[in-house]
Image: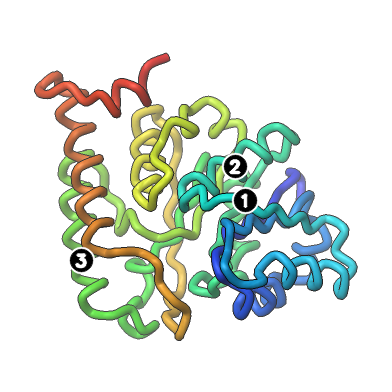
Amino acid sequence: MSKAFAIYLPAYNAALTLPSVLDRISAELKRDAAKILVIDNCSKDDTQAVAQRYKAENGLSNLEVIRNSENLGYGGSQKLAYRFCIDRKIEIVAMMHADGQYAPEILSEMMVPLLEDKADMVFGSRIAGNPLKGGMPLHRYLGNRVLTTIQNLVLNSRFTEFHSGYRLFLTKSLAGLNFEKLSDDYHFDTEMIILHLRAGRRIVERPIPTHYGDEKNYVNIWAYAAHVLVTTITYFLHCKGIRHSKNWHRILEA
């Protein structure tokens, strides 16, 4: 690899799934990563101990485990991880979830546009793959399609989805965005795409396989959908001067 990279795993009650996810990352990537960063978001199980044990048993001196003393939220955990990488001059940060929904086996392929400086952000799209075959529940598939269609219309974009958590970034691009002012909740991901679009950043989609297993999902899909729609539409109205948004003014101000 020609760029220093970090693999970031946000983890909440992930003691049962984290070791298998780490196992599925190639030995070469685990060896070459500047950091394998596990952020335990104040789990109620022994996620932290499991991660530390994996580090010791596999001799991964580059695996760093951070346990938040309180749950910072999904977005809050990402802010911490990206600031960690920026401050350490790590050039690429790749986020995949610790529950095994996103395939570590394709991480090398996902990194290519960033390594070749053809993207500032790479986004793994389940919809561009075959999500129903991978077990995505029909109501989630339909909800994803509806939300994505609305967001594309409002934001004048052409993504196949907005809602996957398999994301990779150039940290020099992140450093120029006010990502630390974004939500601590799950719609952080939508706000992050909006910031990239507004700044003219290069976003590349890559199809990814979909996997739904027995892992527990902590997202209230109805609240998530509402937050996504509100944050997208209020951004549009704010930028068009139709309706002032205190939230977007706070985010976008210099």
Precedes in sequence: disc 3 or disc 1: 1
- The three-letter amino acid code for the residue at tag 3 is Gly
Label 1, secondary structure: give it. Answer: loop
* Residue sitting at x 24%, y 57%: 223
Q: Is residue 110 visible?
A: no
Q: Identify which residue, 227 or 42, lies in the foreground.
A: 42
Residue occupying the far left of the picture: 242
**Residue 80, labelled with which disc?**
2
Q: CA distance from mark 3 to mark 2?
A: 29 Å
Q: Which residue is mark 1?
A: 68
Label 3, secondary structure: give it. Answer: helix
- The three-letter amino acid code for the residue at tag 2 is Leu
> Is residue 169 rendered to the left or right of residue 123?
right
> Is residue 54 rendered to the left or right of residue 10?
right
Asked whether the residues under the numbered discs 3 and 1 touch, taking CB atoms below 8 Å apart as contact, a structural biologist would say no
Precedes in sequence: disc 1 or disc 2: 1
- The three-letter amino acid code for the residue at tag 1 is Asn
Precedes in sequence: disc 3 or disc 2: 2
Asked whether the residues under the numbered discs 1 and 2 touch, taking CB atoms below 8 Å apart as contact, a structural biologist would say yes
* Residue sitting at x 46%, y 69%: 208
Q: Which residue is mark 3?
A: 143
Tell me the mark number nearer the camera, choosing from 3 and 2. 2
Q: CA distance from mark 3 to mark 1?
A: 32 Å
Give the answer, above or below, for where 140 lies relative to 176. below
* Residue sitting at x 38%, y 68%: 126
Label 2, secondary structure: give it. Answer: helix
Badge 1 local density, few (<14 within 10 Å), some, or many (20+)? some
Badge 2 local density, few (<14 within 10 Å), some, or many (20+)? some
> Is residue 45 rendered to the left or right of residue 204?
right
Report the number of numbered marks. Answer: 3
